[in-house]
Every structure is written in C-alpha cells, then in structure tokens.
Image (tube, helix red, strand yellow):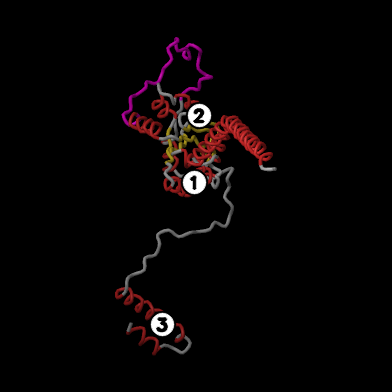
C-alpha cells in the first residue's frame, strides 16, 4: 500500500491518473474487507439464472451426458408382454378365476356399528349427492347443520351395506355407488335443512327416511312445508270438536222443537180456560 502511494507521487504526469484509479480501487477493496469482518458477510447464491439467447430444439434435443444417460437407462421401466401378443394357451385360466378374499377389517365393523346407530336414533335420514366442492365451502355447511341439531356424515357403499344388512333399512343400498353424504336429524328441522342446502347447489337431495317411511325429494319438500305438529293437533281437535257439537245440535234439534210445540199447546189451553171462566160471570153481573 505504501509502495503504491510512493509510486503514484513519483511517477510521471501521464501515468498518474491510472495509478490514482488503481489506488482508489485498492482502498475500496480494503474497506470492504474491513466491513465484512465487522458486519455479517453477504452470501452470494450458488445458482445464477442465465437466459439462453438461442431457442431450444424440442424435436431434436441435445443428447444427455454419459451419467444422465446411464441414469435414464437404469430407471427405464420394464413391461411384460402385452396380452394381445400372448398365445391363447397362456391366457386360459382353466376356469379358475382369481377372486379377492374378503378381509375382516375391525375398523370397518366399528364404522358400520356407528352408521347403524345413527339410523336407529335419527327420525330423519336424508341422502345427499355431493358434487365437486372445496373443503372451504363445505365446512360452513357442516357447522350450520351442527348448530341446528343436524349431523352430516360420509359413508361408503361397503360400510352402509354392512350396517343395513338384515335390517329395515336394507333398501337404501340402491342409492349408494361409492361414498355418499348422509344428514341425520329430526323431522322438525326439515324446513331449516332445505334453507341451508339452498345456498349450496353442489349438494343435491336424492331421497330421505322420515319416521320409517322412504320419501322422494318432492315428498320431503311437501313435508317441510307442513305446519307444526302442535298446530296440526290443535286443528284436528277443532275439527273433532266442531263435528261433535254439530252432531249434538242435530240430535237436540227435534227435542227442542217438540218442547216448543208442547209449550205453545199448553199456553193455548191456558188461554182457552181463562176465557171460559170469564164468559159465565158476565150475564150475572148485568141486571
């Protein structure tokens, strides 16, 4: 460093600017090295993006190097002989078809018992076909149904067949082809269920069971539009009361009419007797 300073001062005038620039660059590098020692060093990335000026030939790509070609050849899959090239003797299974063995899965039995318990404890069971829907849209529907005492469950065909086999719910197996959504609840929440599912067109109601009766979607809609059970009972009591009062009125009408006739007859007889008593007393008082 001292040599550069001394040489920059002693050199000729024409070389002095070059030596001054070299001196400044050396001082800047020295300052950067001091700053790196004091502060944390900046790590430069190992990969640098580079843009190719020419176009890559996709139809005739460049051959890979030896190591990459070796990896490609080593990882190349090996397929067997296709069936259409095999002789008939090898394709013959001699009538012995390989069947999959049914494995007893304890977890499936637990799910089947849970599903059957939901069927037995719920008076309203609605089968829903679920189209493509994200979990972000499905979670609010699940929470809203749970707040209104309705539970959304998802069971597969095998689980439902295991749960309903030999029970009165065995007919619902025809509604299942794969996993299906089921809503368990009470009949008084049917109208609220239709209001909730109206906001989600991805969930389509297929059928339902209400009080051990299988109903279609239209029948479920009619059931949800019916009045409350207490109002229906009050209307039935009013109809029965009106019928009874009408019957009593019709039975008592002839009796009231007969009593009225008798009272009128008695009144006429009393008037006639009074007139007869007055008529003989009038000639005696005249002289």
Residue receiving disc 2: 214
- How many numbered circles does the render carry? 3
Q: Where's residue 77, x and y in %?
A: 44, 32
Q: Where's residue 137, x and y in %?
A: 49, 48
Q: Which mark is residue 134?
A: 1
Classified by dominant secondary structure, the portion drawn in magenta counts as loop
Q: Earlier in the sequence, mark 3 or mark 1?
A: 3
SS at mark 3? helix
Looking at this view, is 264 or 55 the one in front? 264
Query: Neighbour class for label 2 at 10 Å: few (<14), some, many (≥20)?
Result: some
Question: Is 196 situated above or below 116?
Answer: below
How far is disc 3 from disc 2 in space, using C-alphas?
A: 94 Å
The residue lying furthest to the front in this view is: 287
Q: Residue at x 42, y 36 (%)?
A: 75
Q: Residue at x 44, y 26 (%)?
A: 169
Residue receiving disc 3: 24
């Amino acid at each position: 460093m001292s040599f550069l300073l001394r040489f920059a001062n002693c050199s000729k005038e024409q070389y002095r600017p070059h030596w001054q620039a070299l001196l400044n660059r050396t001082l800047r590098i020295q300052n950067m090295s001091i700053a790196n020692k004091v502060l944390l060093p900046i790590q430069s990335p190992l990969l640098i993006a580079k843009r190719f000026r020419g176009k890559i030939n996709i139809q005739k790509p460049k051959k890979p190097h030896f190591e990459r070609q070796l990896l490609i050849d080593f990882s190349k899959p090996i397929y067997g002989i296709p069936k259409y090239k095999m002789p008939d003797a090898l394709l013959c299974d001699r009538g012995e078809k390989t069947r999959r063995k049914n494995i007893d899965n304890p977890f499936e039995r637990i799910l089947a018992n849970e599903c059957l318990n939901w069927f037995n404890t719920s008076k309203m069971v609605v089968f829903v076909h679920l189209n493509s829907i994200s979990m972000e849209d499905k979670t609010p529907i699940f929470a809203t149904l749970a707040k209104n005492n309705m539970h959304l469950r998802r069971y597969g065909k095998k689980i439902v067949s295991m749960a309903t086999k030999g029970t009165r719910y065995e007919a619902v197996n025809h509604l299942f082809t794969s996993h299906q959504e089921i809503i368990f609840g009470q009949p008084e929440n049917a109208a609220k269920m239709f209001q909730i599912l109206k906001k989600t067109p991805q969930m389509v109601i297929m059928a339902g069971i209400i009080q051990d009766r299988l109903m279609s979607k239209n029948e479920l809609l009619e059931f949800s539009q019916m009045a409350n059970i207490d109002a229906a009972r009050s209307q039935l009591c009013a109809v029965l009361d009106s019928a009874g009062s009408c019957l009593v009125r019709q039975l008592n009408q002839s009796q009231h009419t007969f009593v009225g006739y008798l009272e009128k007859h008695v009144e006429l007889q009393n008037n006639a007797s009074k007139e007869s008593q007055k008529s003989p007393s009038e000639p005696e008082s005249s002289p």
